[in-house]
Image (cartoon, rainbow, N blue to C red):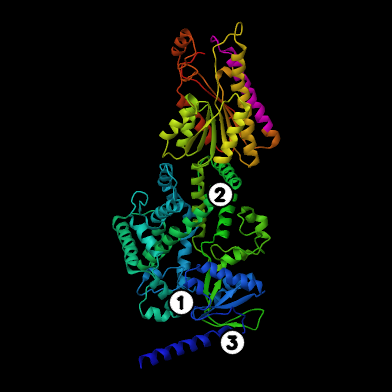
C-alpha cells in the first residue's frame, strides 16, 4: 500500500511539473527548455556554478537566438528573464510601479532582521525609503567619511607589520568590518586585534549556508513565500538575529541614557526613532543591511580592484599619478571632495564593478499585470523577474573584449555613447542601492591607502656594489620594504650570508656575482635577473672604488680601474636597466650614489682621479635626465651625493696609508644606514615628484 502511495505521489508531482513547465508556452513567450526536477537550474543545484553564471548563460543563449526576453524555470516556478536594455529600463524605472518589489524572502514577524530596505516591498518600502533617503545626503556622507578615516591606522599597520604574503581579501574584510562597525553601529569591532571578533564570526555565518538551509530557501521561500512565513522559516539563523538585535539595543540604550551622539549611520536612525518613525527592530534591520553590504560587497570590490591593478602596472601608475595630483590640489589632505575628484580612480572602480559585479543578478516581482509596451504579451501579477547583470556587463556589444580590464570604458565620452542601463552595479531607478555613494567612496579610499603603501613592494631592484658598506645597507633596507633585490658584487658570498639573515622579511635578497668593470659580466647579470626575478624597476648604481693615487706620479692602471667601475660600469648598468624598463613600460627609478667630491674638488690627498670620476657621474645623471625628457619617458633619475661615510673605501680601508686613515677617522662621518634611509625617502616620493640631486653631509663636515 505504501509503495502505491509513493508511486501516486511521484506521478502527481511529475504531472504537476509537466503542466507547470508549459507556463511560458501558454503565455506565448519564448523560453529555454527546462528539465525535471530543477527546471533550468541543474548546474546550480549540483553546485557546479553560481546563480550569476547560470543566468549569464540564459542571457547569452537568448541573445544568440535574438530574443528581447524569455522565460526560464527556477525549479517549478516561472521566471521572466529580461534581455533588451529598453525592457530593463522600463522595469527598473519607467514602469517601476509594476515592479516595486524584489523577489527576496523576508519574515518580519519571526526574523525582524530580514525586513530590511533591500528585501521589503510595497508601501512599507516606500515609507522606509523616504525616511532613509534623508540619512544619505552629501553633508551626512561627509560626516560618515570622517569616521571611515579613523579606521585607516589599523589597516595600514596590519599591512606594514606583515613580513609574509597576505590574504588581501581577509585583510579588507576585517577593515570593512571595522568601518561598518564604526559607521553603522558606533562600535570598535577590533577585528585586526581579535581573531574571534564577534562581528567577524557572525558576519561569516550569514554567508555560510548549510545544504539543508539552501534547499529550504530555494524551494519553500522562493516558490511558496507565504507558506514559508506561516511555517516560521527564517531568512537567517536565530543566533545571528539575536546577536545583532542585542548589539543595536545595547548601543541605543547606552547613547540615550548617557546623552551621547555620534556622526554615524546608527545615530541618524536613532534620530528617526525618536521622531516616532522607526522602531528598534527596524533600526536593527537597516544596520544589519549596512553591515552586510560592507562586510562582503565592498571588500570583494576592493579585492578585485587591487588584483587588476597588480596585473596592470600602467593602470596602477596612472592611478598613482592622479592620487598625487589630487592630494596636491587639496593640500595633502584626503577629503570626501578629493575622492570625488579622482576621476580615473572612479573609472577603475566602475570597471571593477563591470567585470566583477557585486550583484550578478537583479530581481523584481511583478505586483500587477503588466503589458509589454511593443507586444501583445502580459506579465502576470506575482511573476518573478531577473535582470542578468553579469551577462549585460560581459556583452561584447556594449564592452568589446569584455574580459579585458580597461577603465577607459568609463570616460564621460564612452559612457555617453553607451546605453545607460548597460552598467548596473548598484541597480537603477527608485530601488537603486541607497548607500552606493558611500560604498564607492570607501572603495576608492581603501584602494588609495593600499597603493600608497606598496608602490615598490614585490618589484625588482638591482643594487651594484652590494657586498658591503652603503650598497649592503641599501640592499637590506629595500628587502625590509618588500622588494626583490639583486645584489651585484664580486664578493657574492658576503651577500649570500646576509640573504640568510634576511629570510622571513617582506622581500628577498639574491646574490649575483659580478665584476662591475667588465661589460660581459654586467650584461650576463642583468639577463639572470630578467630570467629569474623579473623586470627591473629600480637600479641603484652604488659600485665604486677609490684608490689612493697622485696625478704627479700615479699608476695608470689604478686610474683606469677607477673609471671602469665608477663611470663605464655605471653607464653599462644604466643602459641595461633602461632597456628592461622601456621594453616593459615601467616607470622605474635610477639612483646614482655619487659623492660631494663630484661637485667640488676636495682638498684631500690622493683622491684626484676619484673626484674626476664622480664629476662624470653628476654629468651623466643630468645627461640621462635630458635623454628621458626627449623620449617622453617617465623614468626618474636621481643623484645622491654623500659626504664622508664609514665604509671600506674610507675608514675601514686596508689599502690606505696610516696617515690617511688617521685623517679620515678625525672627521665627522655618516653611517651607511643614513644613505640607505635617503634612498628609501627618494623612492617614496610621489610619481609626479622628481628629486634631481640630494646632498647629505654629517653635521660639522669641513671637506
Q: Is residue 363 magenta?
A: no
Q: Sequence-wise, which precedes: disc 2 or disc 1?
A: 1
Q: Are marks 2 and 1 in contact (CB under 8 Å)?
A: no
In the picture, residue 402 is in which quadrant?
Answer: bottom right
Whichever of labels 2 and 3 marks the residue nearer the N terminus, that label is 3
Circles 2 and 3 in contact, beta carbons < 8 Å:
no
Quadrant location of the N terminus in the rendered image: bottom left
Furthest-top residue in view?
Answer: 552
Q: Residues within 10 Å of mark 2 (few under 14, many from 20)?
A: some
For numbered disc 3, what is the local secondary structure?
A: helix
Residue pointed to by mark 2: 309
Q: In the image, residue 284 lies at what x, y percent?
A: 37, 65
Give the labeled residue for mark 1: 222
Q: Is residue 570 left or right of residue 234?
A: right
Q: Is residue 503 above or below residue 548?
A: below
Give 644 or 292, whichever is nearer the viewer. 644
Residue 371 in view in this figure: yes
Q: Which residue is mark 3?
A: 26
The stretch in magenta equals 601-627
Q: Position of residue 656 (x, y in %)?
A: 49, 12
Mark-to-mark CA distance, 3 and 1: 22 Å
Using a 10 Å C-alpha cutoff, classify the residue at mark 1 as few (fewer than 14 neighbours), some (14 to 19) or many (20 or more): some
Amino acid at each position: 500500500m505504501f509503495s502505491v502511495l509513493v508511486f501516486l505521489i511521484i506521478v502527481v508531482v511529475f504531472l504537476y511539473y509537466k503542466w507547470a513547465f508549459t507556463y511560458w508556452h501558454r503565455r506565448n513567450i519564448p523560453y529555454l527548455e527546462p528539465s525535471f526536477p530543477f527546471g533550468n537550474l541543474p548546474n546550480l543545484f549540483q553546485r557546479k556554478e553560481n546563480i550569476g553564471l547560470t543566468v549569464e548563460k540564459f542571457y547569452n543563449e537568448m541573445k544568440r537566438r535574438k530574443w528581447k526576453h524569455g522565460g526560464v524555470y527556477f525549479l517549478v516556478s516561472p521566471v521572466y528573464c529580461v534581455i533588451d536594455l529598453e525592457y530593463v529600463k522600463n522595469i527598473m524605472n519607467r514602469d517601476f510601479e509594476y515592479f516595486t518589489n524584489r523577489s527576496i524572502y523576508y519574515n518580519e514577524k519571526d526574523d525582524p532582521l530580514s525586513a530590511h530596505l533591500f528585501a521589503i516591498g510595497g508601501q512599507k518600502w516606500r515609507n522606509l525609503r523616504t525616511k532613509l533617503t534623508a540619512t544619505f545626503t552629501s553633508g551626512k556622507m561627509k560626516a560618515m567619511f570622517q569616521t571611515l578615516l579613523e579606521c585607516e591606522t589599523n589597516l595600514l599597520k596590519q599591512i606594514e607589520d606583515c613580513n609574509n604574503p597576505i590574504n588581501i581579501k581577509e585583510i579588507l574584510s576585517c577593515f570593512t568590518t571595522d568601518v561598518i562597525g564604526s559607521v553603522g553601529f558606533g562600535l570598535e569591532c577590533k577585528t585586526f586585534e581579535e581573531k574571534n571578533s564577534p562581528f567577524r564570526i557572525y558576519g561569516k555565518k550569514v554567508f555560510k549556508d548549510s545544504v539543508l538551509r539552501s534547499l529550504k530557501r530555494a524551494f519553500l521561500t522562493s516558490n511558496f513565500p507565504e507558506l514559508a512565513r506561516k511555517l516560521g522559516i527564517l531568512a537567517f539563523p536565530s543566533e545571528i538575529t539575536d546577536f545583532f538585535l542585542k548589539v543595536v539595543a545595547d548601543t541605543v540604550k547606552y547613547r540615550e541614557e548617557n546623552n551621547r551622539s555620534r556622526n554615524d549611520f546608527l545615530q541618524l536612525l536613532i534620530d528617526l526613532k525618536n521622531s516616532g518613525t522607526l522602531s528598534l527592530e527596524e533600526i536593527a534591520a537597516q544596520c544589519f543591511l549596512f553591515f552586510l553590504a560592507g562586510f562582503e560587497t565592498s571588500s570583494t570590490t576592493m579585492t578585485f580592484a587591487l588584483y587588476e591593478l597588480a596585473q596592470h602596472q600602467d593602470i596602477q601608475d596612472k592611478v598613482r599619478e592622479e592620487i598625487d595630483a589630487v592630494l596636491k590640489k587639496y593640500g595633502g589632505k584626503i577629503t570626501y571632495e578629493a575622492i570625488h575628484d579622482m576621476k580615473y580612480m572612479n573609472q577603475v572602480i566602475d570597471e571593477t564593478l563591470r567585470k566583477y559585479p557585486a550583484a550578478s543578478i537583479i530581481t523584481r516581482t511583478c505586483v500587477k499585470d503588466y503589458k509589454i509596451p511593443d507586444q501583445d504579451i502580459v506579465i502576470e501579477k506575482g511573476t518573478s523577474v531577473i535582470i542578468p547583470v553579469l551577462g549585460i556587463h560581459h556583452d561584447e556589444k556594449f564592452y568589446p573584449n569584455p574580459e579585458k580590464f580597461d577603465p577607459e570604458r568609463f570616460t564621460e565620452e564612452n559612457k555617453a555613447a553607451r546605453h545607460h542601463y548597460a552598467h548596473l552595479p548598484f541597480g537603477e531607478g527608485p530601488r537603486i542601492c541607497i548607500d552606493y555613494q558611500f560604498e564607492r567612496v570607501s572603495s576608492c579610499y581603501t584602494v588609495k591607502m593600499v597603493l600608497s603603501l606598496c608602490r615598490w613592494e614585490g618589484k625588482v631592484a638591482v643594487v651594484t656594489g652590494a657586498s658591503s658598506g652603503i650598497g649592503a645597507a641599501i640592499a637590506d633596507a629595500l628587502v625590509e620594504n618588500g622588494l626583490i633585490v639583486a645584489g651585484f658584487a664580486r664578493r657574492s658570498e658576503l651577500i649570500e650570508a646576509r640573504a640568510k639573515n634576511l629570510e622571513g622579511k617582506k622581500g628577498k635578497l639574491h646574490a649575483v656575482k659580478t665584476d662591475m668593470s667588465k661589460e660581459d659580466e654586467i650584461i650576463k647579470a642583468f639577463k639572470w635577473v630578467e630570467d629569474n626575478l623579473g623586470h627591473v624597476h629600480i637600479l641603484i648604481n652604488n659600485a665604486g672604488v677609490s684608490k689612493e693615487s697622485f696625478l704627479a706620479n700615479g699608476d695608470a692602471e689604478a686610474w683606469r680601474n677607477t673609471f671602469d667601475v665608477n663611470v663605464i660600469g655605471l653607464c653599462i648598468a644604466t643602459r641595461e636597466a633602461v632597456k628592461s624598463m622601456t621594453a616593459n613600460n615601467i616607470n622605474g627609478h635610477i639612483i646614482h650614489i655619487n659623492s660631494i667630491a663630484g661637485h667640488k674638488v676636495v682638498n684631500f690627498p690622493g683622491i684626484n682621479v676619484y673626484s674626476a670620476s664622480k664629476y662624470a657621474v653628476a654629468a651623466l645623471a643630468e645627461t640621462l635626465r635630458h635623454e628621458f625628457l626627449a623620449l617622453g619617458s617617465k623614468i626618474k633619475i636621481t643623484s645622491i651625493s654623500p659626504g664622508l661615510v664609514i665604509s671600506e673605501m674610507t675608514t675601514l680601508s686596508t689599502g690606505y696609508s696610516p696617515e690617511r686613515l688617521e685623517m679620515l677617522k678625525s672627521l665627522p662621518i655618516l653611517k651607511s644606514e643614513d644613505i640607505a634611509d635617503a634612498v628609501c625617502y627618494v623612492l617614496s616620493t610621489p610619481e609626479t615628484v622628481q628629486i634631481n640631486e640630494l646632498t647629505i653631509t654629517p653635521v660639522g663636515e669641513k671637506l
